[in-house]
Image (spheres, rainbow, N blue to C red):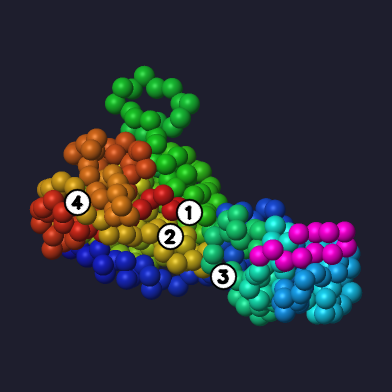
Amino acid sequence: MSLLSYEISQNMLDLLQVDSTRFENVPLSSSLGRILAKDIAAKYNDPQFPTASMDGYAIRYADQDLDSITILGNNPAGHNEIRVIEAGSCIKTFTGSKMPEGANTLIQIENVSVDGSEVSVDQRVELGSSVRPVGEGYKAGDILIKKGTKIGFAEIGVMAGLNRVMVGVALKPRVAIIATGSEILDLGVDSDNPSQIRSSNNYTLAALFELGGAEVIQLGTVGDDKDKIMQTFQTALESADIVVSTGGVSVGDYDFVKDIVPRLGADVVFKGVAIKPGRHIMVAQKDEKFILALPGFAYSSTVTSILYGLPLVSKMLGCHSPYKIIEAKLQEPFIKRSKNTEFTACNIVVEDGQYFVNFDGKKVGSSAILTNLLNSSALMVTGEDDGDLEEDTFVNIILLEYF
């Protein structure tokens, strides 16, 4: 079986054309965690006029040389101040208030002494002190939030300040998930057959794709029956943008998925990649829809979903890479187990701003050990040309906490 290199498979995935223009308008309060479909630009300066950033007295800078300055009154926040500051006068002005015309400096309360309607300066301040200039936060026309941004608390706050009642967000891609194999037993189903195992793949991947911004259609488990698998795939293609299956892609007598995908009228983009785990992965396309046929082992299907499924979802959302790759230093030697590109579960430690990698508690075995991804684990990447690595070697790490 001829295998593509990991790099070529990723390039081929990146070249796939997807529709990233679909969007919907949702209330601002419902946009948290969604992907912004259009740039958010400022219509006005912020602030639109010079504004006090502290409580104090709005004065002319030069008047600090006077023995005393006359207080004309108060200027509370929200007040449309129209009085003009002239030589020898000031107005008590509060945080967030519009600075009176004629004033160019705010002297803080603690810097003056008050005697009736007069203030005297105890400690001078610089020109423009405690005054927010026009456009300090942003200027009219500035792009404040770019298309493709995942909306968080700061984005919500900025858009609220812009009076954005509705927000255009990318339509969530629909991902249908199918677990195949007669040995798979769905949750809640009883069986007297001790050789059957509980299905975890469809639940693991559903959570993974939801975290990646997709809407998930859970189609459960299907036994090793060609007709039933075919029918389930057809149903999935009718309702989803991406169909993800686990199991049935290897070379066994009951691995039917690899044969069924072409019969669905889908074009196979590639089948077989030199990676560990997941070398039997298949990616296919039918019209504007995609099929990811993944291996059945839990760790393998999860890793390949991260490497090939999440990027597709990300492309449909108009985003960049769905995960962050950083450089880290090995805290212990690493023994590479194959000539393929490997993705190894690891622990990340941060010391003095430097990332380090170790494998404490990680079991070496088959591609079924999903527990290796517990406890905020990451994936260490070693290439085809890499061999065993010594302690203190720098390696690339895929961080999984950013989904």
- C-alpha separation, residue under disc 1 versus residue under disc 2: 7 Å
The residue singled out by tag 1 in the image is: 212
Tell me what residue is drawn at x 46 percent, y 26 percent: 189
Q: In this rendered view, identify the residue nearer to me: 240 or 386.
A: 386
Q: Where is residue 320, by image quadrant?
A: bottom left
Secondary structure under the numbered disc 4 in the rendered image: strand
- Residue type of the residue flagged with mark 1: Gly
The residue singled out by tag 4 in the image is: 330
Q: From where the camera sits, is residue 203 visible? A: yes
Q: Where is residue 172, by image quadrant?
A: bottom right
- Residue type of the residue flagged with mark 4: Leu
Magenta segment: 113-123
Secondary structure under the numbered disc 1 in the rendered image: loop
Tell me what residue is drawn at x 13 percent, y 51 percent: 391
Residue 238 x/y as whole percent: 54, 56
Secondary structure under the numbered disc 3 in the rendered image: loop
Main secondary structure type of the part rendered in magenta: strand
